[in-house]
Amino acid sequence: MTTLDTAPVAAPAATPARSVRVWRTLRSSRAAVIGLSVVAVHVLIALLAPLLTSYDPIANSADEALLGPSWQHWAGTDQYGRDVLARVLYGGRYALGVSVTATLLTVALGTVIGCAAALRGGRFDDVLGRILDAVLSVPAILTLLVVVTALGTGPSVIVLAIAVVYVPQVVRVVRGAALAVVPQDYVTAARARGEGTWAILRREILPNITDVVCVEFAMRASWVVLLISSLSFLGFGADPPTPDWGLMVAENRTAITVVPMASLAPIIALATLVVGLNLAADGLSKAWGVDRIREGS
């Protein structure tokens, strides 16, 4: 009589050689280096904003309204006399803070749900798929407007609205990646040992799709930044006088011929951050060999 060998089968861990190879590939990607550098500069500027300007970004000064660039105000002032450069610098804090929080929540929820769907399969996967199809059939901006109209504005509401919009998309991407891991021997062995769903997700599946999750985070972050700025531009995001790039464009668009920098400066800041995030996502994708189309993006 033969006995069944139930010795634990461990999931393959990332070897030092593989880590070095990935790092070298990442460094050799000019797009990744440029993208990560641009994002790092934005983060540094946001953190050092109080040291880079002496102006209060929300202090009004009627005597200095609609001034052009000068030695006192490098990017001029807006219609309320506020220093444009100071508002752009502090605006990075709001954009990065809300965007990173919303993206972290979105990717975390989407990763857990996507992995669970791939592991459980069957009826749970089918029902979840129909729900995702229904949510994804509604335009993202419409869903956002419905949520903020019903619950009001504010950072917490915006984070919740972003999660409602993007979690289904993250679920699809992560589920596609997890489906390639579920049939592996180490997952089968974990099931045979009687491990629970959460233990298998945490020990066997998640470590093997970390690259996909990281790429997804970088890509979603760029879309979240744009979406949050769009909400502020439409009047459903940051409340005045919060220094926010989308709100700045909305407030100064009528005076663009008088003080163009009041609108152009936040647009340039937003564009460079989004481009940096996209370049970083593309570089990470190539370095780790992640095919986002194949994974279901």
Image (cartoon, rainbow, N blue to C red):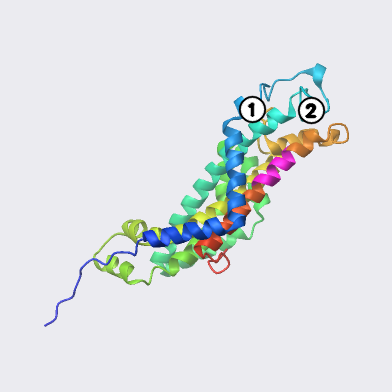
Q: Main secondary structure of the magenta part?
A: helix
Kindly identify the amino acid type of the residue bearing the numbered disc 1: Leu
- Residue depicted at 61% across the width and 29% down the height: 49
Which region of the structure is painted magenta?
266-273
Kindly identify the amino acid type of the residue bearing the numbered disc 2: Gly
Whichever of callouts 2 and 1 sits on the residue coming sooner in the sequence is: 1
Report the side of 287 relative to 139 (left or right): left
- Residue depicted at 69% across the width and 33% down the height: 88
Position of the C terminus by quadrant: bottom right
Tell me, yes or no, whether the highlighted magenta stretch contains residue 245: no
Determine which of the numbered discs, if any, sits on residue 76 in the image.
2
Q: Which of the two residues, 3 or 163, is positioned nearer the viewer here?
A: 3
Which residue occupies the extreme right position in the image?
257
User: How many neighbours does mark 2 have within 10 angstroms: few (below 14), some (14-19), or many (20 or more)?
Assistant: many
57 in relation to 295, above or below = above
Q: Residue 270's x, y, as percent?
A: 69, 43
What residue is shown with label 1?
52
Query: Could you give the CA–CA distance between mark 2 and mark 1, rounded to whole angstroms?
Result: 16 Å
Does residue 29 appear anywhere in the picture? yes
User: How many numbered discs sit on the rendered protein?
Assistant: 2
Position of the N terminus by quadrant: bottom left
